[in-house]
């Protein structure tokens, strides 16, 4: 009997004498990434790609199917509003229309389309300017002939 009491006391000391083991669980809560935009960025449509890309923005933003996709620090984020909240999205979950293009290609497409449109506008402005100059010269020529 004495032996049983000592055995029970020894087991109790072993159980109570050991410090508690800390159990840690990893919990990841994604609240959303923060991007600061004071106003809606300007977008340019890339007709061959089927989506729009932000122009003059500090961020690489793609607009497709009423959603915004932003690429920052090697990751893609998605939102239904340009102000956010932005949620991480895996590359494999991007719409295929966006996913099939590398980011550098998207930037190149954007720049090419932007320059094409601006060059076209510059050409139109130049044509208008040339037409106005011709009208002025014609007017001056008529005025000189009347004298």
Image (cartoon, grey):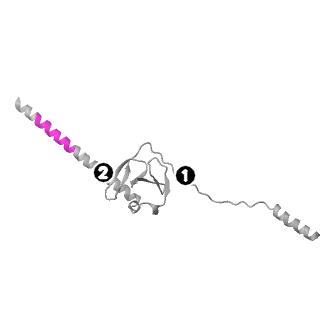
- Residue 95 on image: x %, y %: 41, 60
Q: Where residue 31 is drawn, which disc sits there?
A: 1
| Corner quadrant of residue 20 | bottom right
Residue at figure coordinates x 49%, y 51% from the top left: 86
The residue closer to the viewer here, 65 or 83, is 65
Looking at the picture, does residue 73 appear above or below residue 14? Answer: above
- Residue 42 on image: x %, y %: 37, 47
Residue at figure coordinates x 40%, y 59% from the top left: 98
Q: Is residue 10 left or right of residue 70?
A: right
> Which residue is identified by label 2?
115
Crowd class of label 1 (few under 14; some 14 to 19; many from 20; radius 10 Å): few
Indicate which label's residue lies in the foreground, 1 or 2: 1
Residue at figure coordinates x 18%, y 42% from the top left: 130
Q: Is residue 123 left or right of residue 20?
A: left
Q: Is residue 51 left or right of residue 1?
A: left
- Residue 5 on image: x %, y %: 91, 67
Dot 1 or dot 2, earlier in sequence? 1
Tell me if label 1 and label 2 are in contact, CB under 8 Å: no
State the separation of the CA atoms marked 1 and 2.
Answer: 38 Å
- Residue 52 among magenta residues: no
Residue sticking out furthest to the top: 147
- Residue 133 on image: x %, y %: 16, 39
Quadrant, the C terminus: top left
Q: Is residue 128 left or right of residue 19?
A: left
Q: Which residues are magenta?
A: 126-139
Residue at figure coordinates x 40%, y 61% from the top left: 102
Q: Main secondary structure of the magenta part?
A: helix
- Residue 134 among magenta residues: yes
Crowd class of label 2 (few under 14; some 14 to 19; many from 20; radius 10 Å): few
């Amino acid at each position: 009997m004495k032996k049983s009491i000592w055995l029970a006391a020894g087991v109790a000391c072993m159980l109570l004498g050991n410090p508690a083991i800390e159990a840690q669980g990893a919990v990841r809560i994604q609240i959303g990434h923060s991007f600061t935009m004071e106003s809606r960025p300007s977008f340019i449509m890339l007709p061959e790609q089927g989506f729009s890309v932000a122009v003059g923005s500090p961020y690489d933003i793609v607009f497709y199917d009423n959603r915004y996709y932003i690429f920052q620090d090697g990751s893609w984020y998605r939102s239904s509003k340009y102000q956010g909240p932005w949620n991480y999205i895996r590359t494999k979950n991007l719409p295929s229309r966006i996913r099939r293009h590398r980011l550098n290609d998207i930037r190149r497409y954007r720049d090419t389309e932007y320059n094409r449109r601006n060059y076209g506008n510059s050409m139109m402005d130049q044509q208008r300017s040339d037409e106005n100059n011709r009208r002025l010269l014609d007017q001056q020529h008529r005025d000189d002939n009347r004298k």
